[in-house]
Image (cartoon, grey):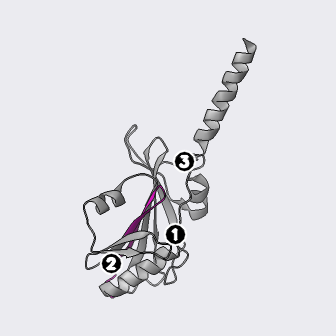
Amino acid sequence: MRKAGVVAAGLLLTVLASCQGSMLADGEMKLDTHKKGHYPRSYKPVSIDKAKDALPFKAQLPEAIPYKYEKPKVVIMDWGEKKKLQLETEYLRKDEKSEKGFIALKIFNHKNLVSDLIKQKKYKDTLELEDGTEAYFAYFGNYAELFWLEDEEEYDLRHMFANEYSEKQLKKELVKIANSMK
C-alpha cells in the first residue's frame, strides 16, 4: 500500500513538473483589470527579460529595428489557462516628430490572428524569409503588415502610421526586421 502511494506521488510530481514548462510562470506579474472567468486576461506591462522568463515558449524578438527606440515593455495576454498566450510589444521611436511610425509585434503560441489572415487570404504578396519560412505581406496605406507561422507560434509584425514610406520601403524594412528574429 505504501509503495502504491509513493508511485502515485511520483507520478503526480512528474505531471506537475511537465505542466510547469507549458504554462505561463506569472508569479510576480500582475493582472490588469478583468472580469473573473473572462478571457483574454491581460497582464500589466513587463520588461522583455521578465516576459522571456515567464513564457513557456521561446518568442523570437527583433534584433534589428531600423531606428533608435525607447526600451519596449511587453504585454502578455492569457487566452486560456495560462497556456494559450499572446505577447505584444511596440518599438516606439525616440524621435516622435516624424511621420515614420513605429513597429508593433504580436506573437501567439496558438492559432489566432495570423492563421485567420492566411486562411482568408488577407495579404497582397507571399515572400520567403532567409530561413525559408513563408511570410505574407499586406499593405493598407498608412501601415503594412508581415505575418508568418513558425513552429507552434504565429508572428504578426506591423509598421504602423508609416506615412513617409512607400509600400516597397515598408516591405523591405519589415522583411529585414523579420529576418533578424531568426
Q: Which residues are magenta?
A: 147-165
Disc 3 residue crowd, few under 14, some 14–19, many 20+, Cα 10 Å: many
Image-quadrant location for residue 47: bottom right
State which quarter of the image contains the N terminus.
Answer: top right
Q: Amino acid at mark 3?
A: Leu
- Report the side of 69 relative to 118 (left or right): right
Q: In terms of secondary structure, where does tag 1 sit?
A: loop
Q: Label 3 vs label 2: CA separation? A: 32 Å
Rendering coords of residue 30 (x, y %): 52, 49
Magenta residue check for 162: yes
Give the residue at x 40% y 84%: 172
Which one is earlier in the sequence, the residue at label 3 or at label 2?
3
Q: Read off the residue under disc 3.
A: 24
Which one is earlier in the sequence, the residue at label 2 or at label 1?
1
Q: In terms of secondary structure, where does tag 3 sit?
A: loop
Nearest to viewer (mark 1 / mark 3)? 3
Give the residue at x 40% y 69%: 134
Q: Amino acid at mark 1?
A: Pro
Disc assigned to residue 11: none
Q: Height in image: 122 above or below 5?
A: below
Q: Read off the residue under disc 2.
A: 161
Q: Label 1 vs label 3: CA separation? A: 20 Å
Q: Read off the residue under disc 1.
A: 72
Q: Amino acid at mark 2?
A: Phe
Give the residue at x 45% y 75%: 129
Residue found at the far right of this picture:
2
Magenta-drawn stretch, dominant element (helix, strand or loop): strand
Residue 100 in view, yes or no: no
Q: Label 2 vs label 1: CA separation? A: 18 Å
Rendering coords of residue 6 (x, y %): 73, 21
Residue 127 in view, yes or no: yes
